[in-house]
Amino acid sequence: MQTVTLSLFRFDKPGSRFWLAGQMALARMALMGMKQVGFWKICGSGMGEGFTPQPNFTVWAILATWPDEETARRDIENAPVYKDWTKHASETWTIFLNPINSRGKWSGKEPFQPDGVMPEGALAVLTRASLRPHMAARFWGRVPDISAVIGTDPNIVFKIGIGEIPVLHQATFSIWPDTETMAAFARGNGAHGKAIKAVYDEGWFSEDLYARFRIAGAVGSWNGVDPLAKLNQIPEPVAEPDQTTEMDAA
């Protein structure tokens, strides 16, 4: 079963960020040489919630696909590129994922191998898009409203904006307690739902991808905690009282 990993690295110290500058070429060469890695991307991050044009130079990500979870865990622990990044980072967190479904392409490829098996509980969502340059202003004009909604939604377990190139190539990664909560946000009548409609009505993107994943686990911490721990803090929906009477049951 294909496993997808998203590894986040925080480089708070100036010396580590100077070291990272040389890694933009070296890490790419290392990942290309790893036989078990399929699709991969090294991404920067944004300052806000989700898509954002303002880069955050302290946080970087490596997204990769693997033939199975065992291989992913072994190589992320032992491969030199991951060990070097972890050594120089002040904090790291990796989440292990299994693709449920995927629509679209990333750099002309279909990177994920979904199995269609939906989880009963939490799931992760990755959205990625290449903006058409002449549509960039319209897109970024919508982003502040979307970011405000994402930042105040108590149901989002975790979210981060990443991307290969600021302004034009952007992605968001988010974790939700269940499918219903995620769908209500994505397709509702709010800022995000209206933006999604405009995307397809007006052709904002030259390429886009949307994928959902089951969560297989995580290692490390982010902001001092394991973000998945929040899943245990979200209350279960309150069930409606059972109105069945003895006559109904009969």
Image (tube, rainbow, N blue to C red):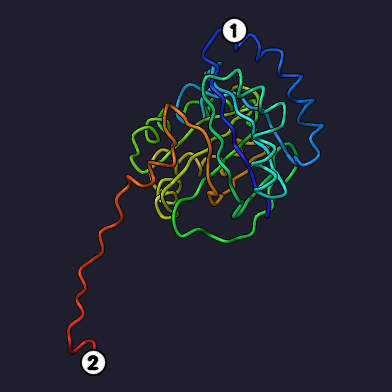
Residue closest to the eye, 238 or 206: 238
Tell me: residue 198, above or below residue 46: below
State the residue in front, 239 or 164.
Answer: 239
Provide the secondary structure element on which disc 2 rests.
Answer: loop
Relative to 210, is 139 above or below?
above
148 sits left or right of 113 in the view: left
Q: Which mark is residue 250?
A: 2
Label 2 Cα neighbours within 10 Å, binned few <14 / some 14-19 / many ≥20: few
Asked whether, in this view, residue 84 is left or right of residue 92, the answer is right
Residue at the far bottom: name it.
250
For the residues labelled 1 and 2, say whether their Cβ atoms are less than 8 Å apart: no
Residue 29, position as x, y percentages in the image: 79, 25
User: Where residue 66 sits in the image (x, y, percent)?
Assistant: 71, 44
Left or right: where does residue 204 sit relative to residue 49?
Answer: right
Q: How many marks?
A: 2
Report the quarter where the C terminus lies: bottom left
- Which quadrant would residue 81 be assigned to in this image? top right
Along the line of sight, the residue nearer the viewer: 58 or 81: 81
Which disc number belongs to residue 15? 1
Rendered location of residue 181, percent (x, y)? 39, 51
Kindly report which numbered mark, 1 or 2, lies closer to the viewer in this rendering: 1
Distance of mark 1 from mark 2, alpha carbons? 75 Å
The residue depicted at 59 percent of the width and 7 percent of the height is: 15
Secondary structure of the residue carrying numbered label 1: helix
Q: Is residue 200 left or right of residue 22?
A: left
| Above or below, 175 relative to 51 | below
Residue 4: assigned label:
none
Q: Earlier in the sequence, mark 1 or mark 2?
A: 1
Location of residue 117 (image quadrant): bottom right
> Can you see residue 142?
no
